[in-house]
Image (cartoon, grey):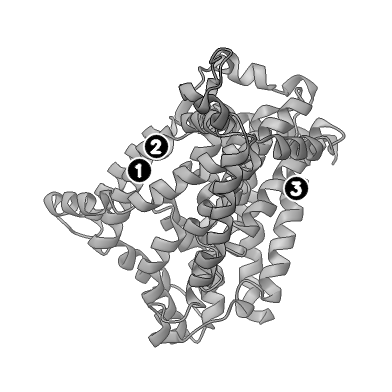
Amino acid sequence: MPDGTSRVLTRTVHAAARWSARWVPNSFVIACLLTLVTFLLVVTVAGKNPIAAEGYWTKGFWELLELTMQMSLIVMTGYVVAVSPVVSRLLEFVAGLASSERTAVALMGLVSMTASWLHWGLGLIAGPIFLQFLVRRHPRIDYRLAVAAGYLGSTCTWHAGLSGSAPLLMATPKNFMEAQVGLIPVSLTTFSTFNLLLTATVVVVTTASLIRLYPRGGDVKTTEQVLGARSAREEAPLDPHAHAPDRGSGFSFAHAIENRYALNLVMGLIGITAFWGLYAESGYRVSLNIFNFAFLFLALLLHPSPASFTRAAARGAGYLYGIVIQFPFYAGMYGLIRYSGLAEIIGRWFVSVATPRTFPVIIYWYSGVLSYFIPSGGSKWAVEAPYVLSAAKTLGVAAPHAILAYAWGDMSTHFLQPFWAIPLLAIARVEFKDIVGYLAVLFVVNFLLVSAALMLLPYLM
């Protein structure tokens, strides 16, 4: 890259970082501010009175409790698996494949995007866990960019991948839209030539962008420089049994069973055999519950004793506070937008200005805007699908095109939204404002690339 272009990128990132440090609050404050903005939209745009709006908010406030527990288990079980002796050695080896700090950041992005394409739950935890090993092998890496790279799976690949909620839902028999549009197999969405090529292009361009964004020597901020005193963060309280205290010279049943592999092996084998029954009952589809079940018992098998397992779980629990506190506020926003009819109003406005040629890219933009306030692909699709697919049919746009446009838009504004970054931010011990400068630049690159692809979609398929 020419020096002039490199200097422009560096100045752009620094300007965005300075702006975010001054104006972007922590992720909990963002959730509160977005709640107030959503209230305002419901009153002014949807025409509801404040009392009714408050009712929509409280109706939705606890609707994501199941998802909250699922997300907590993703972080917990992912952490426990990652710090097991076998997986730790594997991650150390992979982290060592990078020959420099610049390529280490690219490797971080590839790991995150690949894991999220395979399963979005895996991507949520793969990035933050791998980050710890990468920093250990490359202590001089720019920590801000490395953390940002660990978030790219949630912004670039998850909804285009194997666990994308909208394509999977539309391919599931007896789904809520089957009577209107029929079943739409994933061969027309996730595994379509267009989606696979766009995904590959986004991964290549984003990885190259990470390499280009890597700061020059004097501008690099290492882990110690970014975290400062935060690097001395207190550990979570440990299970007293995990310490395996000395029981004296005599035999102790408690000490023996807590510090031997036998119980882990028995319980792990029971869980693994039960997993196949659950998997078959689900129609051989991976769900969050299936994913968490597998990781929980895999963690037991990978740890050498119950004491090792509970010690890792106690430490992993320290990363859950952001999920537990913030998810109800996003559920409240979901209730405001869903029950007030605001989503339909916004959707009709976007559709009113669309043509058959521009419909995919307009749905991409619209889905991104709404995703900033409802960062949940599955629940948001339940709100949008009826009028998005109806409008597509009216305009003569193929339903798979509308679904793909929605899917890509749903993850587009995650670059600027800290909701799905909560596990990463907790484990990395940084605030969203520490990484949003880099994410803003990557958002522009991704937005322009995907918008151009969706503008071409009607001419290609």
Q: Residue at x 75, y 48 (%)?
A: 207
Q: Is residue 255 left or right of residue 341?
A: right
The residue indicated by pointer 3 is 207
In the image, residue 190 lies at what x, y percent? 62, 71
Q: Amino acid at mark 3?
A: Thr
Residue 393 visible somewhere in the drawing = yes
Neighbourhood count class around disc 1 (C-alpha, 10 Å): few under 14, some 14–19, many 20 upward: some
Q: Which quarter of the figure has residue 49?
A: bottom left
Quarter of the image for the C terminus: give it.
bottom right
Q: Is residue 434 left or right of residue 96?
A: left
In the image, residue 401 lies at what x, y percent? 56, 76
Q: Earlier in the sequence, mark 3 or mark 1?
A: 1
Relative vertical location of residue 287 with respect to residue 401 in this rendering, above or below? above
The residue indicated by pointer 1 is 34
Residues under numbered marks 1 and 2 in contact, where contact means CB atoms less than 8 Å apart: yes
- In the image, farthest residue toward the front: 250
Q: Secondary structure at mark 3?
A: helix
Residue 361 visible somewhere in the drawing = no
Label 1 vs label 2: CA separation?
Answer: 6 Å
Q: Earlier in the sequence, mark 3 or mark 2?
A: 2
The residue indicated by pointer 2 is 30
